[in-house]
């Protein structure tokens, strides 16, 4: 059994909820746990669970963020399901959040960009999650940046009160990114 849990996305300036991130969980004997192998989750289950949550939230916020790893992003059934969901949910915008989860399959940058363009064409936005973690390294995300609306860095890569000093790889990547924009 699967279910999406929601995490609020807060506008820090006026402290209002502007969206929700949907996080898929699997029921275990003990409790709900993150899904470790998204290949085991049928795309129709993903679609059904997104719609179930979206029906409760769509009038409250302008967008919902859905996490996809590269394997899901390249799965035609998952892509088709999410594209259909976007047409149902309008005017709510779905944001695709490309996660750092490692894949056993190496997908080309061109293939990933082709998939991102499908979502963009349908009015969705793209976010890259946890840059400098997992497979979302600088080498793997640099070509994707022109197609994104948001880049997220994992807070655990930054030390408290020592922003940009603890993790030199993340600091250097961010500095190069800012210079090239």
Image (cartoon, helix red, strand yellow):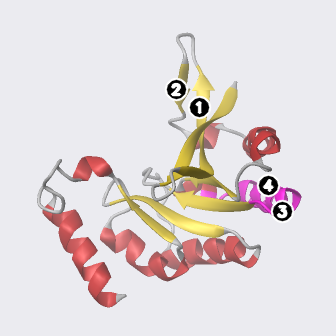
Q: Is residue 178 above or below residue 44?
A: below
In the picture provided, is 157 more to the left or to the right than 2? left
- Residue at the spot x=57%, y=10% of the render? 29
Q: Earlier in the sequence, mark 2 or mark 1?
A: 1
Q: Earlier in the sequence, mark 1 or mark 3?
A: 1
Question: What span is in magenta?
Answer: 73-92
Q: Check disc 3: other Cα within 10 Å, few if <14, some if 14-19, many if 20+.
A: few
Give the Cα distance between marks 2 and 1: 5 Å
| Closer-to-camera residue (127/47) | 127
Q: Earlier in the sequence, mark 4 or mark 3?
A: 4
Location of mark 2 (residue) = 33
Give the Cα distance between marks 1 and 3: 25 Å
| Closer-to-camera residue (70/86) | 86
Give the Cα distance between marks 4 and 3: 15 Å
Magenta stretch: residue 177 in it? no
Q: Quadrant of the N terminus?
A: top right
Magenta stretch: residue 86 in it? yes
Location of mark 4 (residue) = 81
Location of mark 3 (residue) = 90
Give the Cα distance between marks 4 and 2: 23 Å
Q: Is residue 74 visible?
A: no
Q: Earlier in the sequence, mark 4 or mark 2?
A: 2
Q: Check disc 1: other Cα within 10 Å, few if <14, some if 14-19, many if 20+.
A: some
| Closer-to-camera residue (54/60) | 60
Q: Residue furthest right?
A: 88
| Disc 4 + disc 3, Cβ < 8 Å | no
Location of mark 1 (residue) = 25
Q: Is residue 60 above or below residue 28?
A: below
- Residue at the spot x=56%, y=44% of the render? 8
| Disc 2 + disc 1, Cβ < 8 Å | yes
Query: Dividing the picture into quarters, in which one does residue 51 lie?
Result: top right
Q: Name the mark nearer the viewer: 4 or 3.
A: 3
């Amino acid at each position: 059994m699967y279910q999406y849990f929601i995490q609020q996305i807060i506008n820090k300036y006026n402290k209002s909820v502007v969206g929700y991130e949907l996080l898929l969980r699997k029921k275990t004997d003990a409790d709900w746990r993150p899904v470790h192998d998204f290949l085991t989750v049928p795309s129709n289950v993903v679609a059904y669970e997104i719609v179930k949550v979206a029906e409760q939230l769509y009038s409250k916020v302008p967008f919902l963020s859905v996490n996809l790893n590269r394997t899901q992003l390249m799965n035609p059934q998952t892509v088709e399901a999410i594209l259909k969901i976007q047409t149902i949910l309008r005017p709510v915008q779905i944001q695709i959040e490309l996660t750092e989860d490692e894949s056993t399959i190496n997908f080309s940058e061109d293939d990933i960009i082709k998939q991102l363009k499908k979502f963009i064409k349908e009015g969705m936005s793209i976010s890259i999650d946890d840059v400098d973690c997992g497979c979302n390294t600088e080498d793997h995300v640099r070509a994707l940046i022109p197609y994104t609306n948001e880049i997220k860095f994992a807070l655990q890569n930054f030390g408290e009160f020592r922003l940009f000093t603890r993790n030199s790889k993340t600091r250097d990547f961010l500095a190069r990114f800012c210079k090239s924009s």
